[in-house]
Image: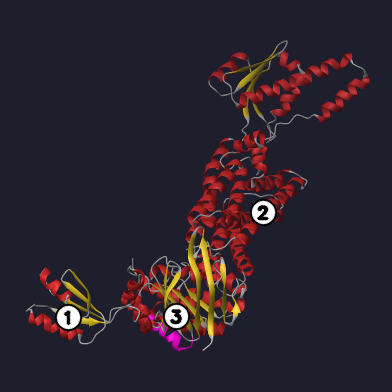
Amino acid sequence: MYFHIFINSLKVLFKNKMLIFWTFIFPIVLGTLFNMAFSNIEKEEMFNIIDIGIVNDDNYKNNQAYNMAFSYLGNVDDDNRIFNISYGSKDKLQDMLEKEDISGYLYLDTTAHIIIKSNGINESVFKYVVEEINTISNGIQELEFRSIEEISKYAISLMNSEVKVNDTTKKNMSYTMIEFYTLIAMTCLYGATLSMYSLNQILPNMSNKGKRVAVSPVSKFKMILASLGASFITQLIGVLLLFIYTIFILNVDYGSNIFLVILLAIVGSFSGLALGVFVSSILKKNENTKLGFIIGITMVYSFFAGMMGITMKYIIDKNMPIINKINPVNMITDGLYALYYYDTLDRYIFNIISLLIFSFILIFISFIFLRRQKYDSI
Amino acid sequence: MANIISVKNLTKEYGSLKAVDDLSFYVKEGEILGLLGPNGSGKTTTINSILSLLKFNKGSIKIFGEEMKPDSYDIKSKIGVIFQEVSVFDELTVYDNIDYFCGLYVSDKNTRIKYVEEAIELVGLTDFKKFYPKQLSGGLLRRLNIACGIAHKPKLIFLDEPTVAVDPQSRNSILDGIKKLRDDGATIVYTTHYMEEVEILCDRVIILDKGKIIAEGTIDELKKLANIEEKVTIEAYNLSEDFLHSVSELKNVLEVKYVDGLLTISFGKGKSNLINIIEYLKEKKVDYNSIFSERPTLNDVFLELTGKDLRD
């Protein structure tokens, strides 16, 4: 009997075009759009080698700190070098600056001077690097007035405070990944449409079919279990398809802990199922209104979790952290984020537990409402 | 014959409104009981209370000799219900819909296949097995609705207005199907506001109004409650007021109505009313296109008892 209900519930869900669109097609379409939009942004933000100039007069040649630093930072044999350095006279470099062949140039007298034409990322990096060299250089010059112990301490601190400018955009993980994380989370939550629909079909006060089911010799519990089981499986298939599509077609990298990613998606889908049960049992509206409510609230959840721009997530986290603490999309997104960025699983596990608590609270409230419900119609 | 259903003092209130008011009745094994009444008379509420879909305020309900409760699965397994609203899955074909609902009662797959095929044949949907509900006409959809409710061969069947908005062909098919179910041994409770269907189908009728039973009995027993014995309808045009007045003065005439060229004369007790009126028309040299006589209907009974029409 259970299997009969389960199989037919699956058939009903898979043949419902509206539900299949929201849980299967919409996330894939959205993922494709994200990929098209963000891949261009990422290309634009790839770190390029900065063209600069240095006036190689005696002041520069005699300054060992600058000499060594720029030899390293502009080493043509190093693919990870930051600068492409042109050496020459002040006039020549000024001319190059005017023609925008270089972002700026450096010349030294009693102090270091940076000549730039405009303000941008390249100019900022150039200025930052010169300031760092200046600071270290000054520190070294002071050493001759210090004790051996102080010199040792300073040397150790210098060794430990290695200054690096890393091109983080060359790693697979980027801030746009948060959009794909929220996409996965949103898809998990859209499972609510499936469980809401399934439950509506078997409750006598929700649909005519529910009345027919209610007069059959099948217990309510068995009916609910089989129907929700089918909606959960359908939901997992939807999430799995999205994973396959994003990994193999869009080349999204979810990191090495793919099993933990899948576990989070399963728990996230469970919270989606719980949301659907909650909406179905609490909201005394027709099916389309409930569907609209679920889609609407999931979009709001996703917006707060950073789907339309990570800035929103930062704003919410900073000003109203409680909102994202009870936001299941954020719990899933944050769990995926933590899994990628952190070596420990503490934050990941915290999000898993938060999702489970969120789900069980919704199911508990729904259970109370379902027990109290009676069909009433004149 | 044993009572399949016993309802005693059933009362269901919605706030201050008594939808069902102290209702007591029984349904005997093998009969078709008609619950007749206008919209809002409490027919559906009564059925839903019997089926434990509604919590009622007072009374007791026994089916097959046992008290009916929401978890009376043994009783439920012998019941089939056809609701007023079409209750099928748009996503499943005709066959799959019947199979799904039959499967809630019958676990064995081979038995189920046989039952589903028989139900499809009974309601005349053999050519539409692979159709989806949206591809069916209103009448065919109603037939599917019935098939979903009776495929598991229940001993007790509730049909709640199954022929609402159905074309004549489908209506006849549905009524024939119901008779066959009764002939096969099922007990049927049939609610409707179509008195013609009740007269064709039902062995016994309960007439409801405002949640109360206002009359109960066989069709003949109920018709005796009406004062009129015979109604004669004449199609004749341009009849004068004087003539109409003279007709109302004739022997046994209770009421005369003349609307849109149709003269309806209600007679009380008495014989040869039709012959008498034909002779009177001849005597007065009144031309007429047609004339026919009919026995009083349940609507006349309802009119007599409540002062209003069944379809009001």
Give, as a three-letter code, the residue at label 3: Leu
Residue hosting label 1:
B291
Image quarter of the N terminus of chain A: bottom right
Whether residue B214 sits left or right of residue B307 in the image: it is right
Task: Say few, some or many: other residues with alpha carbon within 10 Å of mark 2 (under 14 / 14 to 19 / 20 or more).
Answer: many
Give, as a three-letter code, the residue at label 2: Ser
Q: Nearer the viewer, mark 2 or mark 1?
A: 1
Residue hosting label 2:
A359
Whether residue B197 sits left or right of residue A161 in the image: it is left
Subunit of label 2: A
Q: Residue at x 44, y 80 (%)?
A: B33
Task: Say few, some or many: other residues with alpha carbon within 10 Å of mark 3 (under 14 / 14 to 19 / 20 or more).
Answer: many
Check residue B33 in the rendering and tell me which mark sits there, or answer none: 3
- Dots 1 and 3: beta carbons under 8 Å? no
Give, as a three-letter code, the residue at label 1: Ile
- Seen as rendered, the residue at the extreme right is A148
Q: Secondary structure at mark 2?
A: helix
| Magenta extent | B175-185
Q: Secondary structure at mark 1?
A: strand
Q: Earlier in the sequence, mark 1 or mark 3?
A: 3
| Disc 2/disc 1 C-alpha distance (Å) | 74 Å
| Disc 1/disc 3 C-alpha distance (Å) | 34 Å
Magenta highlight on residue B104: no
The answer to which image quadrant residue A47 occupies is top right
Residue A72, percent from left and from top: 73, 28
Quick check: can you spot residue B239? no
Q: Nearer the viewer, residue A74 or A226?
A: A226
| Disc 2/disc 3 C-alpha distance (Å) | 49 Å
Q: Nearer the viewer, residue A46 or A258?
A: A258
Residue B304, percent from left and from top: 33, 73
Residue A301, percent from left and from top: 59, 45
Q: Secondary structure at mark 3?
A: strand
